[in-house]
Amino acid sequence: MTVQSEKDRRGADGAPPPPAVEMRGIVKRFPGVLANDRVDFEAAAGEVHALLGENGAGKSTLSNILTGLYRPDAGEIFIDGEPVQFHSPRDALDARIFMVHQHFRLVEPFTVAENVVLGDHRGEGRTFRLRHRAIEQRVAELSKRYGLAVDPRARVWQLSLGEQQRVEILKALYREARILILDEPTAVLTPQEADVLFETLREMAAEGRTVVFISHKLHEVKAVADRVTVLRGGRSVATVSAADATLRSLASLMVGRELDSGQPARARTPGEPVLELTDVWSDADRGDSAVRGASLVVRGGEIVAVAGVAGNGQRELAETVAGMRRATRGKILVCGKAIRAGDPRSAIAAGVAYVPEDRLGTGVAPSLSIASNLALKGYRERSSSHGPLLRIGRIREHAVELIQRYSIAAPGPGAPARLLSGGNLQKVVLAREFSGKPRLLIAASPTRGLDVGAIETVHAYLREAAADGVGVLLISEDLDEILLLADRVAVMYEGAIVGETSREEADVEEIGLLMAGGQDPRAD
Amino acid sequence: MNNSLLVVVLASGVAYGTPLLYGALGELLAERSGVLNLGVEGMMLVGAVMGFWTVQRLHADTALSLAAAVGVAALAGMAMAAIHAFLVITLRASQIVSGLALTIFAGAAGLSSYLGNDLNLADNPARHAFNAAVFPSSMQGWPIVGPIIFGQNVLVYASWVCVVGVSLYLSRTRLGLNVRAVGEAPASADAMGINVTAYRYAHTLAGGAFAGVAGATFTLAITPQWVSGITGGAGWIAIALVIFAFWRPALCLVGAYFFGALQALSPQLQARGINLGPTELWANSLPYVMTVVVLVFVSASGARRRLGAPASLGLPYVREER
């Protein structure tokens, strides 16, 4: 880590050229949050520079400032040593800074080519009249040159998420971006697709561009970056060379302390099946079937993980088992008994607990008190109600007890749930679901958006549940998490379970292949 | 032959359909940018009264008077649309509430009637009006196409130019691409450096101008005089037309003339002594019934995307939010 002097940065004769991008003392406040607190960041031309940090460390805010989407409250930005001020995304685009957002900024009904030229006022798209032919040709050229296979005439909504990401990168190349920022680009990719992406990024850096790679996954950062800047709690804590860093040193920089490296799960003897799915089908939110003939068995005391790229029916599968979505075909047995399709109450009665992916919308009622939220499932029981009357005092006592046992950081049992942070909200959901003494626990992306500390807690609770003999069905897009927790891994692709392996035999390469539908993206 | 029922109904259908067409084109522009404008009826009425006022008060020759009147009507509609735009784009008020409020404010019991009374416009025929003497009368006498195509006034021909213009603008130009992006995915458009607010303002205002002209079509060509509430719900049909037309300008034209022809049908049947039951009832209510049917179909089939409804229609855009 070197600190450049003022003179160096100004690029006196013979001195090294100024960094392609430099941000100094960036401060950005949101109501109640200091998202960026005097952040310093610099990246050189020709390097892949990773921006590493936990969720909420300020990575996205910093990049949104660099792309002109947010205005910083304080601080300066230099491009090639020249101070710049971005008033809108247009200014940043004109400075040839391009960002691939985590949620793609594409217009779904448009073709690939139309998306690529959108907003362009320099290249093929600058003329008043759109010359579709010329535009499509240019996009085809670019996609060929960089090996980003995608049909310029296809409509974006027809494309897979991996293809959509290629469209975003094509947009950057079309604009001749010199600084390309990618926010968590591997979240929607299989491991193989991620490798292909890394190659593309290295190639782009080799052409003299600056690639800023935002991630919280250590091994990716280590694999692709030249240097790493670590953000923690809105501050920049260090910039290190990736070659010198170890996963351990990066992790402790990111979290600010040493981590337990997740003790390997002990071998358990699985019990009776608590969940048996046979050829289950259910509809998607619109149109078609999302779950198409899924079959799976979960036994008491084991954690079965469903891996897959987002959008392959995992969420719908979880909802179907939880009784929130009607199965159109197939059999769902919980502890040997069939549950009524599309009836959450019958699922709850059979012993199904559900930790939904959308924790604020489905997991809790945000404006109700924590106590009410904790009682949401058990309010019919004798301990919480007398006929139609709620026993408010008992509900409150119960809540105080759970808040203590699960160490939920809350102002009190009467505080509305929406005031809690993501991690504490998840603890409320877990506390409620566990207190129903479930036989089967469905956890859909239970750690998404949580910080490392909260992730550890959630993992510990899931292990504990399994140790108590509960069957856990874990749905996750994070392979690291899956390999850390699961006894068995099932891969879901286009609505069906396409493969299953035990953890001991699990092979990331193979799981990745299955996630992609058995096709190796490097083959074409 | 030119007096046969079909030709007469079609010829007057084109005339009656023209205000619907202008109104629908304007609504289409606004909706394609993501702004739902339910104030079309009110904007039409204000355009109708202001256009008529101009023609009565301006002492100039026919062509100049009429051109000025159409211009004033467009500006009046635009002024109303500016209120809507400010409320829903800048202040992010509910588009439905704002649009309804504007129609009530300007409608038959509101501003337009007040202006009409205050300026003493009622019960006088227009001093100048758009007449059908664009093409020589020999051409107007040609069988079938004569009355339908060559027997119309300038506003009709201008509306055809507008259909082609709007259609090409949306599908073939860079600005049109940007508008569609703003209506579909404002966050994506914003990230690509397109000024979402500016596009929405511009197209809402343009929509208001079209609505104003639509109103003037009633008072300067169809009737031509001022009566309170003269548009008789045409603004609402125009909004429905946009859905019928799947947000496509050319289909707006077809739909407008279809509804116009329905309107022309019942007086013609009466005049010819043909009795098809309560024609007035079914001919006049059919547009509304069809609107309901189409709306149900559109919302039930979940096929909005394929039909072409802009994805962010009715939703305000906020950039800095977390």
Image (tube, coloured by chain):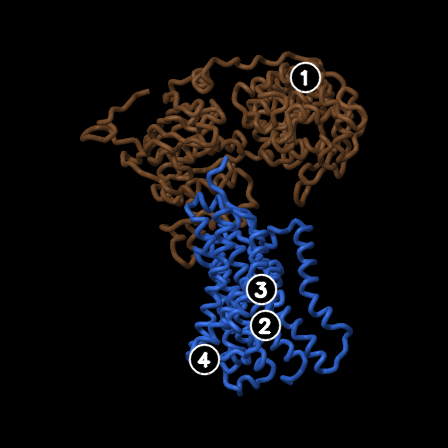
Disc 3 versus disc 2: nearer the observer: 2
Q: Which residue lies furthest to the bottom in this view?
A: B138
**Secondary structure beneath label 3:** helix
Element carrying mark 4: helix
Q: Residues within 10 Å of mark 3 (few under 14, many from 20)?
A: many
Is residue A275 shown left or right of residue A218?
right
> For the residue marked with disc 2, what is the amino acid?
Val
Q: Name the residue under label 2.
A: B227
Q: Mark 1 points at which residue?
A: A466
Q: Which of B189 and A36 is in front in this view?
A: A36
Residue B243 seen anywhere in this rendered image of the structure: yes
Q: Which chain is brown?
A: A
Q: Quadrant of the N terminus of chain A?
A: top left
From the viewer's perspective, is A36 left or right of B84?
left
User: Which color is chain B depicted in?
Assistant: blue
Residue type for callout 1: Ala
Q: Is the same chain shared between marks 2 and 1?
A: no
Tags 1 and 4 on a common chain = no
